[in-house]
């Protein structure tokens, strides 16, 4: 076992012990009354009630009793998800680690369950909840993107598809914003080749980036500074074609007018309005729902 895997296992065990002890301290408020004909149903209903009231420890005890004592219960799948949901609801670093483990186990044990889509969705949300600001480490953002993309591939008819698509867009925006901020830093520092490389990478890997108007504009500006006017012009025009509202519209219109006039004076053939620069890509589809900060 690698050092990283060993550390993760130790952390998982320690976190489980800590939360189990806390649950025990919270009291065992789940004794089954005598005469109950379906004790597993009783436990599940009480666990669900506690979960809805955000009584995470209590809910987890009810669900754990189903898993530990009723191997043939029809509520086992939902109880497994209930345990995972209680950890996710708690929201601590330790509980999120345990939530991810519970959702993965569910997908391993019940891959054909009608609730597998829910488990995959929530597994993505575990990582989504841990995403950091664009200027910081993006490991959890990448993990969220991976799990949401897996959901979109496996569950095309899921009731959660719209929600997952929105969260996936937000996560991708976070990654692209991180890349954009690096490119914009290079642009401000005058290192245009580095800026161009970063901006082109965004348009290639994430053509639906919500704030790609800023990428179009600053990529075009960087190209312009390197006298690559013919590559810059289509980017300004794409900005005008794809965005009805943008802080860069007025400047882009001015640049288009100036560049086309200069090309006509020189006898050069202006590129088509929908032309592409080498190494860039775009889309006319508008994406919404992003939660990242507007670029400068």
Image (cartoon, rainbow, N blue to C red):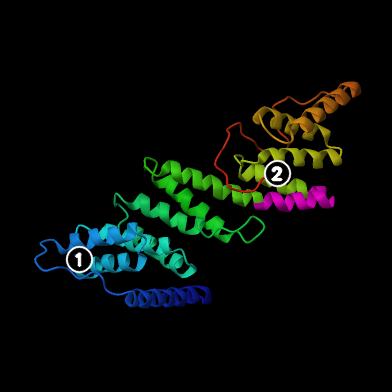
The residue under the point 27% across, 65% down is 63
Does the magenta portion include 189?
A: yes
| Residue at the spot 54% in from the left edge and 42% down from the top edge | 289
Which residue is disc 2 drawn over?
200
Determine contact: label 2, label 1, CB under 8 Å: no
Q: Is residue 210 above or below residue 1?
A: above
Q: Nearer the viewer, mark 2 or mark 1?
A: 1
Measured along the vertical axis of the image, is residue 54 above or below residue 237? below
User: Badge 1 is on which residue?
Assistant: 71
| Rendering quarter of residue 72 | bottom left
130 is within the stretch colored magenta:
no
Q: Give the alpha-carbon distance from disc 2 to disc 1, as whole Å.
A: 55 Å
Tell me the element at label 1. loop
On the question of residue 109 being in view, the answer is: no
Residue 227 location (% of width, % of height): 87, 38
Query: Where does the magenta region start and end?
Result: 178-194
| Residue placed furthest toward the right | 266
Across and down, in percent, residue 12 comes to: 43, 73
Locate residue 253 relative to residue 35 in the image: left or right: right
Q: Which image quadrant is residue 250 in? A: top right
Is disc 2 surrounded by few (<14), some (14 to 19) or many (20+) residues within 10 Å?
A: many
Q: Is residue 257 left or right of residue 284?
A: right
Badge 2 or badge 1: first in the primary sequence: 1
Q: Disc 2 on helix, strand or loop?
A: helix
């Amino acid at each position: 076992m690698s050092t990283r895997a060993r550390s993760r296992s130790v952390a998982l065990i320690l976190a489980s012990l800590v939360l189990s002890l806390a649950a025990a301290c919270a009291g065992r408020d789940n004794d089954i009354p005598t005469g109950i004909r379906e004790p597993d149903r009783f436990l599940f209903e009480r666990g669900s009630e506690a979960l809805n009231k955000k009584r995470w420890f209590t809910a987890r005890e009810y669900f754990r009793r189903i898993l530990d004592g009723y191997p043939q219960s029809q509520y086992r799948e939902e109880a497994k998800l209930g345990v995972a949901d209680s950890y996710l609801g708690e929201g601590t670093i330790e509980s999120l680690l345990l939530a991810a483990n519970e959702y993965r186990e569910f997908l391993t044990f019940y891959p054909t369950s009608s609730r597998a889509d829910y488990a995959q969705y929530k597994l993505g949300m575990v990582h989504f909840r841990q995403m950091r600001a664009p200027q910081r480490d993006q490991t959890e953002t990448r993990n969220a993107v991976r799990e949401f993309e897996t959901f979109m591939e496996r569950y095309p008819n899921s009731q959660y598809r719209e929600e997952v698509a929105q969260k996936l867009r937000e996560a991708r925006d976070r990654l692209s914003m991180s890349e954009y901020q690096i490119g914009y830093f290079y642009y401000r520092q005058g290192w245009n080749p580095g800026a161009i490389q970063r901006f082109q990478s965004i348009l290639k890997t994430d053509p639906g980036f919500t704030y790609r108007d800023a990428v179009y504009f600053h990529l075009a500006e960087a190209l312009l500074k390197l006298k690559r006017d013919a590559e810059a012009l289509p980017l300004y025009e794409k900005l005008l074609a794809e965005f009805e509202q943008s802080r860069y519209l007025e400047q882009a219109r001015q640049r288009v007018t100036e560049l086309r006039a200069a090309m006509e004076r020189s006898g050069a053939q202006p590129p088509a309005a929908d032309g592409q620069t080498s190494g860039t890509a775009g889309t006319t589809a508008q994406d919404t729902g992003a939660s990242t900060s507007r670029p400068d």
